[in-house]
Image (cartoon, grey):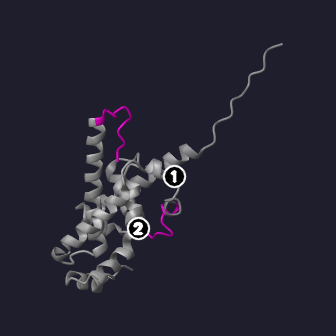
């Protein structure tokens, strides 16, 4: 049964200390989310983009804007919202650079809450590290790709993602399940073995 009250932010004490200028508290937040944030950025961006720099910029922005954080969402949700914006900026800069260099030959790539262990999409969580999945994920329409990456890489729940993206929760749930259906079909196509070719015997 869902609680009527939101869960308290587990980062609240560290955030409060960091807002008062405690650098060690913010370092603790960086340590807590650096790996997850780096994974999220790498999933969203082209391998030619320096994802470590983008991740670092996200934390720099978070530190600079922390005084304006009012706790209307969890710190993690707010942090990954910053990451979304930085990823979009990095992608646009990368595309502009490719245009300048004339490297435009390749096609442009588009870019109740379910239980993670029992929902029909549970298989996805075990596959997020696989190259095939990441490749197929990058081919989804941007809204579908976005919700899956925020759910699995950022580990945000659907209500948090809906608030972050300013999307109606029912719409987001539909998008979530549509994304899984499309991804499953793509993976099944990639992983299915080729159909053996029958050799027709010559007539005597």
Q: Which residue is mark 2?
A: 36
Q: Earlier in the sequence, mark 2 or mark 1?
A: 2
Q: Residue at x 17, y 77 (%)?
A: 67
Per the rendering, the mark at residue 85 is none
Magenta segment boundaries in residue numbering: 101-123
Write down the quadrant of residue 42 in the picture: bottom left
Q: Position of residue 100 (x, y in %)?
A: 26, 36
Locate residue 187, reporting x and y percent: 52, 48
Residue highlighted by disc 1: 131
**Residue at the spot x=33%, y=59% of the render?**
53
Q: How many marks overall?
A: 2
- Describe the element under mark 2 as helix, strand or loop: helix
> Which image quarter: residue 150?
bottom left
Q: Please state which of residues 172 and 109 is positioned toward the viewer in this rendering.
A: 109
Crowd band around label 2 with a 10 angstrom C-alpha radius: few (<14), some (14–19), many (20+):
some
Q: Dominant secondary structure of the magenta stretch?
A: loop
Q: Looking at this view, name the residue that lies furthest to the right.
A: 204
- Residue 103 is inside the magenta segment: yes
Of the pair 157 and 26, the residue shown nearer to us: 26
Seen from the viewer's position, the closer of residues 162 and 114 is 162
Q: Does residue 203 appear left or right of residue 69 in this picture? A: right
Q: Is residue 202 left or right of residue 122?
A: right
Question: Percent position (x, y) of residue 202?
Answer: 78, 16
């Amino acid at each position: 049964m869902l609680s009527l009250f939101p869960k308290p932010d587990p980062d609240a004490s560290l955030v409060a200390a960091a807002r008062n200028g405690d650098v060690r508290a913010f370092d603790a937040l960086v340590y807590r989310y650096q790996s997850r944030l780096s994974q999220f950025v790498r999933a969203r961006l082209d391998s030619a983009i320096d994802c470590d720099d983008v991740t670092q910029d996200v934390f720099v922005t978070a530190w600079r804007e922390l005084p304006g954080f009012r706790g209307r969402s969890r710190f993690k949700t707010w942090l990954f919202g910053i990451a979304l914006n930085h990823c979009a900026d990095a992608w646009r800069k990368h595309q502009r650079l490719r245009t300048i260099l004339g490297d435009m030959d390749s096609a442009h790539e588009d870019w109740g809450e379910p239980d993670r262990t029992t929902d029909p999409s549970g298989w996805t969580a075990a596959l997020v590290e696989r190259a095939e999945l990441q490749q197929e994920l990058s081919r989804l329409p941007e809204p579908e790709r976005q919700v899956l990456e925020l759910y699995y890489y950022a580990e945000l729940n659907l209500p948090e993602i809906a608030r972050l993206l300013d999307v109606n929760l029912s719409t987001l749930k539909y998008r979530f399940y549509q994304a899984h259906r499309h991804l499953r079909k793509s993976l099944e196509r990639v992983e299915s073995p080729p159909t053996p070719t029958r050799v027709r015997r010559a007539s005597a």
